[in-house]
Amino acid sequence: MKKIADFSEEHAKYIKRFKKENALVTVLRFALLALLLGLWELFANLGVIDPFIASSPSRVATTVRRLFVEDNFLYHIGITLYETILGFLIAVAAGYVLALALWWSERLRRVLEPYIVVLNSLPKIALGPIIIVWFGSGVKAIVFMAVIIGVIVALITMLNGFLATDKNKILLLKSFGASKFQILKKLVVPGSLPTFISMLKISVGMAWIGSIMGEYLVSRAGLGYLIVYGGQVFKLDLVMASTVVLCALATLMYVLVAFLEKKIIKYKN
Amino acid sequence: MEKLLELKKVSLTYQTLENEIRAIEDLSFYCNKGDFLSIIGPSGCGKTTVLSLIAGLLPPTSGEILINGKKDYEKNDLGYMLQKDQLFPWRTIEKNVYLPLEIKKSLTKRNKDFADSLLDKYGLKEFKKNYPDQLSGGMRQRAALIRTLVSNPKLLLLDEPFSALDYQTRLSVCDDVYKIIKQEEKTALLVTHDISEAIAMSDIIIVLKSRPAKVKCVFVPKIFGESPLKKRESKDFGVWFEKIWKELDK
Ligand SMILES: Nc1ncnc2c1ncn2[C@@H]1O[C@H](COP(=O)(O)OP(=O)(O)O)[C@@H](O)[C@H]1O
Ligand SMILES: [Mg+2]
């Protein structure tokens, strides 16, 4: 529902100018991409850069096609997607639940604070060897990597969101005689929905970092594996092709979250 | 006259790590049914604390608070209106107004109908399904008042409810709220640092001395006019303003 629809001529002009500007920006974005790809292709063809080391757009395209047809590319993509999505879901769920617990109990929050600080600053890749020993070198280890990288950030983001709840609104609910659980359910959880969405966006990125890093360390399949393998045997086409597909997938996942945001948040803050 | 609210030698001390803050000491006053009573005093003198005590959000360090002569009164008897409207932006106006009923687990058909009738009566009929950000400041304030009225409280506690509004809106919202309170025959206790607001709205004005809060003096301004805006136009208004201003300044 709109407030008041008052479309004067000035306003129509303003909207038109705004739309024109938007269209121009979109065109320029694609133009920039085309320019970069074009230069890359051109330099590779002219021999300014060595296509063996730098690959080229056409070689990447050919490789992607060949990977789909001849090699089991879908299988590798599937493995990585599975690890990433599973890691993402577990990290988000665990982070959310832990944040709820820490919001609920100030004592627990104070007790765990130093542990969270340490876990947050620890470079999780240092845990690689331990993870391999514990989980073997397969999907489980990689999902675990994605989870430990994601969960701390999810937890900290959510907890800050919960703690930022307006004190006066809490007071209002208390004046109605609300219990702590009611305050949580009616105010803290719905009020932190925007934080939840930004947490999801951050967590998408974290899950990709986790799964690809995990694959670098241990795997025998997946996009991260193809990238490392391609590097080792000097097949830059393979590295580039896998990276491009990775970019596309990560963007897609982000777009999905952004779409979710539009769906569930209907009010302005 | 029947005393609806009575404070007897109420004191409150806040404990902090650095020190003790004696916010209120031996505060006694009462309020009759149907009165509109204002408490004024400078910022930080303990006005919000008084309301929190009455609302039962804080236990007094000593003294008693009685409603209808009873010490353990119900939350239902009170409606608390805070600074700003405090409407939840993710709820529609209607859902905001139902909130106290949800919390009190009394969202019955009858109570819902009562809430709807209030929304209809006070011009929010078309806005029930709107979100708060789609309403003007005045309408939001009205919605906030209706939210406090849905559980049919005996006493309304208003904590500088207009302070977040600009001057023009404030005058009209003040008028609006006053009329609704009178029409619903509620007893109200308003806390403010705005002298003219207190004079325009109330039958009785209690001036507080600051830290620890105590009653300094009481005024009963008799100004002709059936609404705050009309009272503001009266020539007595300035006289009373000066009297109270001098007292506050002492
Ligand atoms: N929770 C609290 N802990 C410690 N001191 C407080 C607390 N709340 C209020 N105070 C102090 O008590 C005094 C009265 O506060 P308040 O009732 O909010 O005043 P007012 O509403 O008149 O501005 C102030 O000096 C304030 O600093
Ligand atoms: Mg205050």
Image: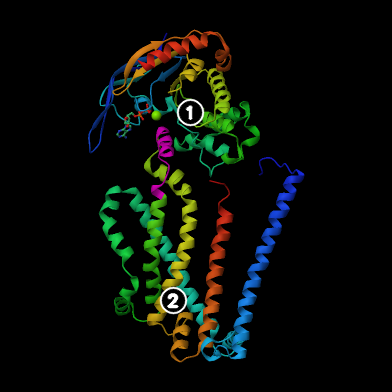
Magenta stretch encompasses residue B46: no
Residue type, numbered disc 1 = Pro
Q: Is residue A139 visible?
A: no
Q: Which residue is mark 2?
A: A212
Report the residue marked by disc 1.
B161
Q: Nearer the viewer, residue A236 or B115?
A: A236
Please tell me if label 1 and label 2 are on a single chain: no
Residue pictured at 35% horizontal, 18% vertical: B208
Vertical arrangement, residue B12 with respect to residue A29, above or below: above
Residue A168 shows in this picture: yes
The N terminus of chain A: image quadrant: top right
Label 2 secondary element: helix
Count of numbered labels shown in the rendering: 2
Span of residues in magenta: A162-176
Residue sitting at x 30%, y 29%: B59
- Secondary structure at badge 1 equals loop
Closer to us: B169 or B180: B169
* The one of B118 and A36 positioned closer to us in this rendering: A36
Q: Residue at x 47, y 55 (%)?
A: A196
Instruction: Measuring from the top left, give residue A227's x and y in whole percent.
Output: 47, 83
Q: Are marks 1 and 2 in contact (CB under 8 Å)?
A: no
Question: Residue B95's x, y, as percent?
Answer: 55, 39
Give the letter of the chain under mark 2. A
- Give the vertical position of B29 relative to A150 (above or below): above
